[in-house]
Structures are given as structure tokens and as C-alpha cells.
Image (cartoon, rainbow, N blue to C red):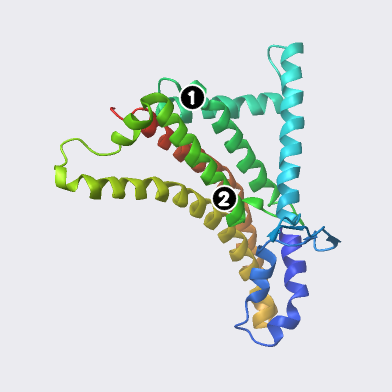
Amino acid sequence: MITETIKAVSDSLQVVEHGAEDTSWIVHHILDSHELFGIIPLPEIHLFGLDMSITQHVVMMWLALIILVIAFTKTAKSYKISRAPKGVANFLEVLVLFVKDEIAKPTIGKGYEMFLPYLLTVFFFILTCNFLGLIPFMATASSNISVTASLAIISFFVVQIGGVIKNGFFGYFKGLIPHGVPTWLLPIMFVVELLGLVTKPFALAIRLFANMSAGHIVILALIGLIFILKTFIVVPVSIAFALFIYLLEILVALIQAYIFTMLSSLFIGMAVHQDH
């Protein structure tokens, strides 16, 4: 990450020299790209007026998918050989049990098994995308608002489907309105509750997007101070703080995967068990 950052800032020196206030180079290296690693051009596909191009973040998601398929396939095979798997299989088992016992069970309660596969998929996918973004010359797909919004929309439909299956279509939406509300307030409360259903996935998308983008922006800004101020005095401070933020990003990558999964599970629990 630091190596990639220094290269990115060096490539942007000409932009910075035209004005210390120009920070467009930071945005350029945070946003998605049609070039892989900034070198390999990716195909641009336009279908029926829609941009279906393969971008760097799409490649990162594919890579995350491949890594997870290989890791869990080997883990599944290891259980056939030994009841006590070691190495990667043991690490994955710890995370699976964590999601099951610390997230799904407490927040959903009875019937959590139905939603556990989805929660595990979301957790490991976000976690893998986050960690891929910490590798030099890679990109963080979870810092793309389109990716986080898609994940949030999927969670939204899982929540609604879970609530309808458990309570019935009319029973679920009837349960959204608190008991004891005056009749004349019912239309207003129904609209408010519907807006609440929409704001939950919106919050999920923005939280993940903002947190995964913020760390990269801070690191780029800290390294950029060296070139903007044009003095070696700030080099030790900038590098030290950039390394600190980079190490903090490792913790953030874990926390954000946990928070997204935990909130999704909490929303599912609220929809499934409306009477509790």
C-alpha cells in the first residue's frame, strides 16, 4: 500500500506543482479505473446504453471470489481427511463460528440457521475485498459506492423476504406500525416506517464505503505532504503516520466486515421477530 502510494504521488507531481490546493490526484487514485494496476487496459463494454465495462474493482471482486472458492473448497476437503483441520482451515473455522455464535445467534435468535449462509458469504466477501485493498498495487472494491450499495440492496431484500416468510405479507407490513398508535396517525406512521426500511440499507452502504475510502485518502494525503511542502523535514513524520494509518486499516478491514454483517443480521432479527 505504501509503495503504491509513493508511486501514485510521484506520478502526480506535475499536478501538484500547478497548485498545492489541487487534490484531484488523490481522487484519481481512489476511484475505479479501466486499467488494471494502472498498466493493463480492461475491456469497455456498452450494452443498450448501459456501461457494462470490466473495471479494476470488478477484477478485484472476481479475485476475492476465486480466493474464497479455493479456500473453502480445500477446507471442506480437509474435513474429510481429519476432524481437526489445521492452518487455513482452522482459521476459517474460527471465523465461521464467530459469525454463527457472536453475530447470527444473538441478533436473530430462533431460526438463524436459515440466514447464516448469507451472513457468512457477506462477511467473508467484504473481509477479502478489504484485505486485497491493503496489498500494494491492488484496489479496494469495498470502497466503491456501487459495490457497497449492491451489497446493501441484497441485505434489504433478505430482510424483507425473511420478515414476509416468518410473519406473512400483510402481517409483516402491519407489524411495522407500533401498537397503540391513533388511527389518524396510521398513514403517517406507515410512510415513516417505509422510509425507515429504505434508510437502513442506505446507512449500510455509506458506512462501508466511507470507512474503506477514508483510510486510503488519509494515507495519500500524508505522503502528499512531502511533495506539496517540498521539504525533507516532514518525511519522517509523514511516513510514520502513514504506516500507522496503514496498520490501523488492517483493524478497520476486520471491523467493517463485522459491522456490516452484524447490522444486516440485526435488521433480519427485527424483521423476523417483530413481536419481541
- Residue 273 lies, in percent from the top left, at 35, 27
- Residue 194 lies, in percent from the top left, at 35, 46
When asked about the image quadrant of residue 163, the answer is top left
Residue drawn at (29%, 35%) of the image = 174
The amino acid sitting under disc 1 is Asp
In the displayed structure image, the side of residue 204 where residue 237 appears, left or right: right
Name above or below for residue 14 compared with residue 179. Answer: below
Q: CA distance from mark 1 to mark 2?
A: 25 Å
Residue drawn at (33%, 36%) of the image = 173
Tag 2 residue:
148
Q: Secondary structure at mark 2?
A: helix
Residue 223 makes an appearance in the image: no
Residue 193 makes an appearance in the image: yes
Q: Quadrant of the C terminus?
A: top left
Q: Quadrant of the N terminus?
A: bottom right
Tag 1 residue:
101
